[in-house]
Amino acid sequence: MKPRARLWNLGFLSLLTTQFFEAASDNLVKGAIGFAIATSAPWEPVFGEGGNGIVAIAFALPFILLSAFGGRLADRLSKSRLTILIKSCSFLVAALALFGFSAGMPMLALASLILFAIVSAFFGPVKYGMIAELVAPEQLVRANGIINMATNVAVIGGGLLAGMVSVHWKDSFVDGTPTGFGAYLPGLAVLALVVGGFLSCLTLPYLRPQAPELPVNFNPFSTYITTIHEMSKSPLLATCLAWTYFYFIAAIVLVILPDYSSFLKINDEQNSYLMAALGAAIGVGCVGAAYLDRPSWRARFIAFGAFALAIDTIALGLAPPDYRITMYLLIAMGLIAGFYIIPLQSMLQLHAPDTSRGRVLGTANGMSFTTGAIGGALFYGLRTLGMPSNRVFLVVGALTLVVGVLIVLWNRANPTSTHEASPRHA
């Protein structure tokens, strides 16, 4: 199928909706577990101090191990048919989440999160590769902005739902075990989102395989090695490294925020509003960056995003325990993030060859979760050393300043690396 000239075609709308439900369900489960193991929460004794760092690593591992293989399948098979198969598997995972939360079994709930991560690891390269097959190249940047906005709206919805159902789920505990309807709320909410994602993917048009002759290789590391080697011959690898750094920041922010219920002395529902504000701001920033995009401006957008994110995270690390100040700084972070993410994400898709786009994006996805796991490990290590969660932002800010300097130096050495290019052969 050739890319459609019109942005708002049925295939793009179907992908947009499917991705919305996918992101919402993942973040609902992740958020509910995060609140369950945060400071003073029912499952905190199971995971200990900094337990959200362990969860972040567990969530990231399937992406690290399977994204490249998922990218290979995305190149070899029809992306639309693969999406339907992937979404069908989500029903079994939702059932496991329902049982884990309702029975008060933290390891079973964690297992459901890991299985959702496995499903998403396969869907990641499929969805990002599919965008370029559903819309024309000149619409790609805007399509990415819209997809990212919808994803962040979904993150908001999933985060808000996680906060709301967590309050009722915690209130349902009697003698250390959840009881009544509140015990089932997290699982039922996840199941509803999975149903929505499955129904929405059924309207995807058939997309022909881009590389049907590609052999199946179950060794994920060989795909990573060969793809990274090919990426190193162009600006793709540097673009990918800069793009994945954002997910290092995001992973740390998402494991810090559950502890803000204790730091700011607020409940989980109020905490979820902080996450919602961050997600909404990222969505607005992504759309703004997409519509302001010009090839000659991308280098400036990326550098601005890096330095502004550094300043914002340092400010969060120094801020007093004030709910309003925290909210404003998180909104600023989200608005800035869009100007960092969108140029880099679009450059990945524009520079990736058609016949290996799935592998390139799968490798990028795996690398992003590798940096996310490193972020989770860093958070866990700093917390076990006694650093308060809010002060971890200072470390993130210092690292981001270094990344900003490296980006400026790279742009000066490669002044045309941000310009549009869409090679057609692997």
Image: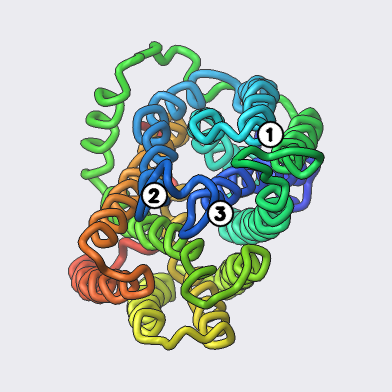
The CA distance from mark 3 to mark 2 is 11 Å
Camera-side residue: 275 or 74? 275
Count neighbours of disc 2 (C-alpha within 10 A) and say few if under 14, some if 14 to 19, many if 20 or more: many
Q: Position of residue 389 (x, y in %)?
A: 36, 68
Displayed quadrant of residue 381: bottom left
Inspect the image, locate mark 2, and give the three-letter code of the amino acid beneath it.
Answer: Gly
Query: Which residue has dot 3 on it?
Result: 35
What is the number of the mark on residue 277? none
Q: Which mark is residue 51?
A: 2
Q: Badge 1, how many Cα within 10 Å: few under 14, some, many 20+?
A: many
Residue at the spot x=57%, y=80% of the render? 327
Query: At 57% from the left edge and 72% from the top edge, which residue is drawn?
Result: 285
Between discs 3 and 2, the one toward the N terminus: 3
The answer to whether residue 256 is left or right of residue 127 is: left
- The amino acid on which the numbered mark 3 sits, given as a three-letter code, is Phe
- Indicate whether 155 appears above or below 57: below
- Number of callouts: 3
Quadrant containing the C terminus is top left
